[in-house]
């Protein structure tokens, strides 16, 4: 049994068939005929039958680009968007240079003069602050070379973290930077890769500075949503329209052949604020920032690990609450939770966000929230998604002093905090 063989076997009383993609550490990765991969322990497979197959080769493609079109760089970090599967061998073949990329998506030539670079080939779950710095510096290098826009491709699972990180790290952007992924591999008939890339390129043609996400707005190929990089969130594990905009309208919608601007105020603000000398304000790569989710039956010991951290974001309930009030013999632990939060807030920045995702933190409404404010918990009035709050706090810790962070966290630095509406004011205060 070798990588590239076609393999038939029984696993957990089910007969399966596909191509052996990888054999490593007594586990086999098999691309099933359905197109999905399964990782199985070899010792649990029975009735194994194999059929050796030869690898197919992709012929070289000659590409003639139009130098009159805008120059756009595509920086790859991994994910399925710039790869295809050789179904004879099951191997995933990376397509990263311009010729290979255009062989996959020839329609890109209609909109831009494409340049392509590989930064990493990794799952998005493996992203760390160091990778955000690598991407941000690579983006700046491309901008300094004179490109009209940059696309960053990566896996979708933490794509919204990356978009938020680039939004903070890249100061003074004067071109659009669009983070793009795909929910389905590029060789599948249902792939969203080409449509997402085309939507990103069409939006880049508008020349609106800032960091954005380009993904399907619906499950069909009708239109692409352009989401501000500080308001995006992955809200479904597998649908093509997995990404939504949180607490802000879409920036734009890309139906076939055109661009519809939706958030005209944000677009105008971005154009006016654009600087000519962008720079990178990087993340400290050894920084420890926690993200703790408040829940029923919480214990103070859960917060003990953060004693040695540099900062903490609490994903609170409702308007920004945590179980800190002892009300009977069953809730005495809550007093210890409050003590732990208060102790942490004296030494490190502790910020509140909300599990509801949509809506704003308002710790003034109920007494537990007011107590948290008294203990120095930050975040009052903020409506950032938890992931953006986590990234913002990490970036502030990387670039500012403690006393500055307490002020800056509450301020709208990159458009991450939306303006309060009259409806909010009438219901929450």
Image (tube, rainbow, N blue to C red):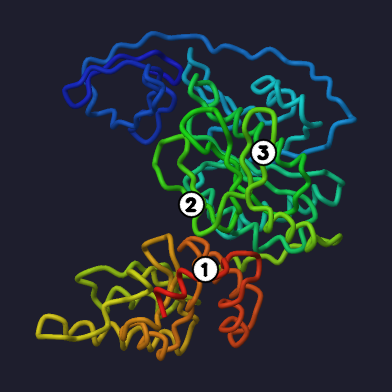
Location of residue 33 in the rendering, given as x and y in whole percent from the top left corner = 37, 16
Upstream in sequence: badge 1 or badge 3:
3
Residue ID for mark 3 = 200
Q: Nearer the viewer, mark 1 or mark 3?
A: 1
Residue 288 visible (yes or no): no
Upstream in sequence: badge 2 or badge 1:
2
In this rendering, position of residue 254 left or right of residue 300: right
- Quadrant holding the C terminus: bottom left
Tell me what residue is drawn at x 50 percent, y 59 percent: 247
Q: Are marks 2 and 1 in contact (CB under 8 Å)?
A: no
Upstream in sequence: badge 3 or badge 2:
3
The tag on residue 233 is 2
In this rendering, position of residue 278 left or right of residue 386: right
Q: Nearer the viewer, mark 2 or mark 1?
A: 1
Residue ID for mark 1 = 421
State the residue lying farthest toward the right.
Answer: 68
- Distance CA(mark 2)–CA(mark 1): 22 Å
Location of residue 305 in the rendering, given as x and y in whole percent from the top left corner = 36, 74
- Quadrant holding the N terminus: top left
**Quarter holding residue 280:** bottom right
Camera-side residue: 429 or 173? 429
Camera-side residue: 215 or 344? 215
Q: Are marks 3 and 2 in contact (CB under 8 Å)?
A: no
Tell me what residue is drawn at x 63 percent, y 84 percent: 404
């Amino acid at each position: 049994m070798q990588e590239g063989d076609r393999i038939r076997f029984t696993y957990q009383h089910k007969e399966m068939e596909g191509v052996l993609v990888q054999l490593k550490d007594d586990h086999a990765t098999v691309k099933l005929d359905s197109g999905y991969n399964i990782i199985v322990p070899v010792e649990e497979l029975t009735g194994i039958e194999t059929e050796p197959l030869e690898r197919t080769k992709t012929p070289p493609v000659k590409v003639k680009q139009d130098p009159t079109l805008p120059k756009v760089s595509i920086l790859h970090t991994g994910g399925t968007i710039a790869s295809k599967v050789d179904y004879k061998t099951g191997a995933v073949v990376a397509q990263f240079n311009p010729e290979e990329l255009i062989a996959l998506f020839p329609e890109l030539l209609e909109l831009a003069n494409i340049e392509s670079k590989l930064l990493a080939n990794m799952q998005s779950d493996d992203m760390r602050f160091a990778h955000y710095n690598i991407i941000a510096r690579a983006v700046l290098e491309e901008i300094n070379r004179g490109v009209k826009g940059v696309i960053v491709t990566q896996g979708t699972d933490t794509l919204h973290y990356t978009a938020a990180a680039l939004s903070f790290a890249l100061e003074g952007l004067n071109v659009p930077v669009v983070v793009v992924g795909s929910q389905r591999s590029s060789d599948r008939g249902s792939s969203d890769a080409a449509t997402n890339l085309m939507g990103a390129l069409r939006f880049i043609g508008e020349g609106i500075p800032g960091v954005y996400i380009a993904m399907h707005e619906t499950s069909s190929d009708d239109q692409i949503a352009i989401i501000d990089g500080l308001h995006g969130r992955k809200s479904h594990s597998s649908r093509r329209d997995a990404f939504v905009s949180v607490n802000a309208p879409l920036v734009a919608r890309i139906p076939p052949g055109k661009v519809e601007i939706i958030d005209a105020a944000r677009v105008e603000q971005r154009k006016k604020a654009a600087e000519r000398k962008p720079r990178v304000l990087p993340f400290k790569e050894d920084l420890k920032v926690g993200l703790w989710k408040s829940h029923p039956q919480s214990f103070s010991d859960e917060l003990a690990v953060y004693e040695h951290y540099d900062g903490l974001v609490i994903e609170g309930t409702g308007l920004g609450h945590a179980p800190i009030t002892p009300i009977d013999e069953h809730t005495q632990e809550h007093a210890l939770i409050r003590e732990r939060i208060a102790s942490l807030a004296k030494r490190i920045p502790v910020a509140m966000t909300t599990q509801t995702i949509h809506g704003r933190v308002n710790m003034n409404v109920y007494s537990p929230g007011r107590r948290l404010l008294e203990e120095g918990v930050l975040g009052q009035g903020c409506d950032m998604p938890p992931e953006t709050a986590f990234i913002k706090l990490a970036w502030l810790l990387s670039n500012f002093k403690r006393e500055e962070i307490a002020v800056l966290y509450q301020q709208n630095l990159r458009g991450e905090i939306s303006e309060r509406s009259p409806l909010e004011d009438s219901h929450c205060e």
